[in-house]
Amino acid sequence: MTEEEEFIRRLLDPKTQNAAFEVLLQQYQRPLYAHIRSIVLNHDDADDVLQNTFVKVFRHLQNFKGESKLFSWMYRIATNESITFINNKAKKHRQTSEEFQQRQIERIKADDYFDGDEIQIKLQKAVALLPEKQQLVFKMKYYQDLKYEEISGILGTSVGALKASYFHAVKKIEEYMSKD
């Protein structure tokens, strides 16, 4: 039995579940927050989505089949929760998800947890203009420095397709960033 299989067994066992889930939180809270924050942009929203993600992980752990790493499965949940969050917020404000994201970028300077400069805001704008899949691939590769194999497990896309998406995303971002 691998270390991960043993850890999952402890997560599923009612006797060891709470302690194992504490370990899970400690191990994945920061990387999942960073991933979610790169998608939803706002700190408070990222906290809400992170909490929803861990609730879903806890509720659906018994459905985890082990076909991917636990890390990939949790990132997939975090990604889906983030996208759902953006779509729901956009719908609530009668906007497209793209319009909503552009509005979030305009507000990013007011976020106490954002310490970037004008170039970072311009980069955020460029990324927000990408198609959703390219955005996700770019953010996972550029910001979280995930390997293509890990991203493949999270998004369920081939490594070759991910490399192509990343290449096209970088080209579009470079074009946007070189404009005045």
Image (cartoon, grey):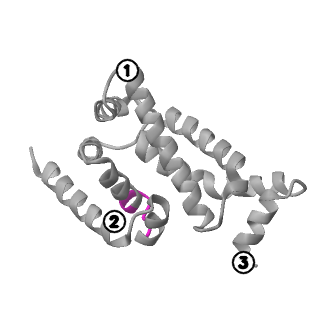
Rendering coords of residue 103 (x, y %): 31, 29
Specify start and end residues of the magenta stretch as a single range: 141-147
Report, in whole angstroms, how far the alpha carbon at label 2 lies from the one at label 3: 28 Å
Instruction: Report if residue 81 lies within the magenta region.
Output: no
Report, in whole angstroms, how far the alpha carbon at label 3 lies from the one at label 1: 47 Å
Mark closest to the chain's N terminus, 3 or 1? 3
Quadrant holding the C terminus: top left
The residue shown at (64%, 44%) is 56
Task: Read off the residue under disc 3.
Answer: 2
Task: Residue type at mark 1: give it.
Answer: His
Rendering coords of residue 163 (x, y %): 30, 68
The residue shown at (28%, 30%) is 99
- In this rendered view, identify the residue nearer to me: 73 or 100: 73
Task: Read off the residue under disc 2.
Answer: 162
Mark closest to the chain's N terminus, 2 or 1? 1
- In the image, 129: left or right of 22? left
- In this rendered view, identify the residue nearer to me: 50 or 8: 8
Task: Name the image quarter holding residue 64.
Answer: bottom right
The image shows residue 2, relative to residue 50, as above or below, that is: below
Mark closest to the chain's N terminus, 2 or 3? 3
- In this rendered view, identify the residue nearer to me: 1 or 119: 1
Task: Read off the residue under disc 1.
Answer: 93
Tag 2 secondary structure: helix
Q: Are marks 3 and 1 in contact (CB under 8 Å)?
A: no
Task: Name the image quarter holding residue 104.
Answer: top left
Residue 31 visible in rendering:
no
- In this rendered view, identify the residue nearer to me: 113 or 152: 152
The residue shown at (39%, 25%) is 91
Task: Residue type at mark 2: give it.
Answer: Leu
**The furthest residue to the right:** 15
Report, in whole angstroms, how far the alpha carbon at label 2 lies from the one at label 1: 32 Å
